[in-house]
Image (cartoon, grey):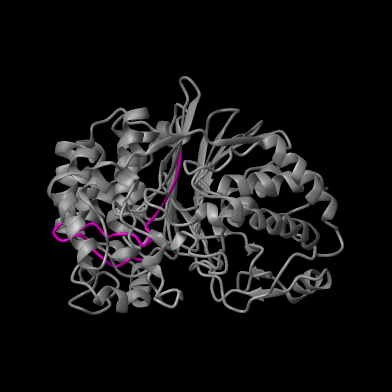
Amino acid sequence: MNVIQYRTGAFYLNTSLIWFRFLSCSIFLAVSSLLIPHPLMAAQSAIASAHPLATAAGERILDQGGNACDAAVAVAVTLAVVEPFSSGLGGGGFLLWHRSSDRQQMMIDARETAPSGIRPQHFFDVDGSPIKDATVRGGAAVAIPGLPAGLARLSERCGSLPLGKTLASAIQLARDGFAVDSRYVNIVEMRQARLRQSEGGQRFLDRGQVPKVGFVLRQPDLANTLERIVEDGFKSAFYSGPIAQALVNTVNGAGGVWTMNDLVNYQAIDREPIVFTYRNARITSAALPSAGGIALFQALGVLEHFELGDAQNPQTAHLVVEALRYAFRDRWRLGDPDFGLPPISKDLEKIKLNQYVKNVSPDRVSALESLDESPISGGDHTTHFSVIDSAGNRVAATLTINLLFGSGLVGQGTGVLLNNEMDDFTLRGDIANSFKLKGGVANGVAPGKRPLSSMTPTFIEDEKGVLVLGAPGGSRIISQVLLASLNYIHNNEVDLRRMVSMPRYHHQFWPDRLELEPNGYSSEWVKKLEDKGHRVQFGVRPWGNLQAVFQSSKNANAQAASDPRGSGLAWY
């Protein structure tokens, strides 16, 4: 997709962002005022998110003296309002943060957990066959949300502003509404049947129909929930009292097994991120229960043994695909580290990777496993944003409610759209989830357990500076971040717009095929990969929505880029 970007003041805007898509008079005036350049701040701070109004909310917080963590809270909650199909208070995610004053950094694990009453048999019939859609529809599909606790943790650990400021933009947009864009309309059209099945889901429609571009979506119940959070804090307001009880009633009324204690006992967890080096670059990425950082470590650990050109070069692409295949093959052994999983030893991993390197041939694909014809899902699911401030504080956050619009259930009177994250557990070794991912017993369903994820929020530090990046897209998140990382590390010049817009390819071991974005690769390119034994298939549509920011080590100047496949906004 060729999309030119224009710079207006301190912003880059995709040409696909036509103003009337998100225009109501008051909001337009507010956003327009932010298009005035801010020379001092714009030179050293940057935000990239999947929606212009979320980016503007974060910029407003930086302008008020907040830091990257404060801006991240504002962006995350605003995305819950304006991009409800991808993330929200009813979901979870991983927030990677770095504080420049003492170089402390941590990954906040805000992944959803299985409710205490859930058992694997909830998803099988009397004959032992999986019940169709049981992990994606109805109350049994909904895991205990983690994002509110995660944002509370982020605010406590490195924020500086009160919630009254960081949540102000989101509350106004929920209360007064915002005009939806073509991306929102297209996604609602895909999910309209699901939304019509519940009273809460119908609130994302226009009197029961797919809205037109410019339709003003108002969410007064969500505004009230956010105002309660400002008064009482994320933890007290969301995980106990009337909001929590409404969520329990809604989920259980649709066949779930939640209890109030499931919410009261939920905890966001501080986890040490995985940190490793690749060709003199220091990479910090997500730890378990996300498989993203480990997969990135494994893939780059294989590739470090080979001479590489541009990742879009067919010869290099072959090696990248081989590295992905081995990384995804190892995913089956991973799961929630709090459920008896042995700790990952980087030393042992490197011994194993050395064996993988011996099996990788520059001329021929490795013989690994089976083929499958069905398409891989993912592309718009989940969201990511990246923030860095003038002091060097930074946040990479990948957030989700799993599939588009999650379960379609909305907590009565709360405006909170609920996830269908139970689909990310492994029901049985031969049963793939919606992203065609299979797993092992380490990712089996158990009360209080967190499902395995592919989310890969990442920092890369080298002599050029610091890159903060991540993406949505299910299993394709890992390949997107890997390709972007290679583009950054193997080039002397930093070109974020090329990084976020270049064509993408993906392999996840099973199905054993190389998937390409449509129109991204020539027939000659494809033939070179097929000649090495790859089974190549073009995807139905482009995928992902990469968001990246960079701060230079030379002068602290910053830049940002938002993926042209989406309708996001990069500010610096």
Residue at horizontal 59%, vertical 56%? 480
Kindly indicate the quadrant of the structure image that contains residue 312: bottom right
Main SS, magenta residues = loop
* Closer to the camera in the image, 233 or 542: 233
Residue at horizontal 16%, vertical 61%? 412
Magenta includes 402? Answer: yes
* Closer to the camera in the image, 364 or 540: 364
Asked whether residue 34 is in view, the answer is: no
Kindly indicate the quadrant of the structure image that contains residue 341: top right
**Residue 232 rendering spot, x and y as whole percentages:** 16, 37
Q: Is residue 42 rendered to the left or right of residue 558?
A: left
* Closer to the camera in the image, 115 or 105: 115
Q: Is residue 553 rendered to the left or right of residue 55?
A: right
Q: Which residues are magenta?
A: 395-420
Q: Is residue 297 rendered to the left or right of residue 209?
A: right
Asked whether residue 188 is in view, the answer is: yes
Residue at horizontal 43%, vertical 37%? 42
Residue at horizontal 41%, vertical 33%? 41
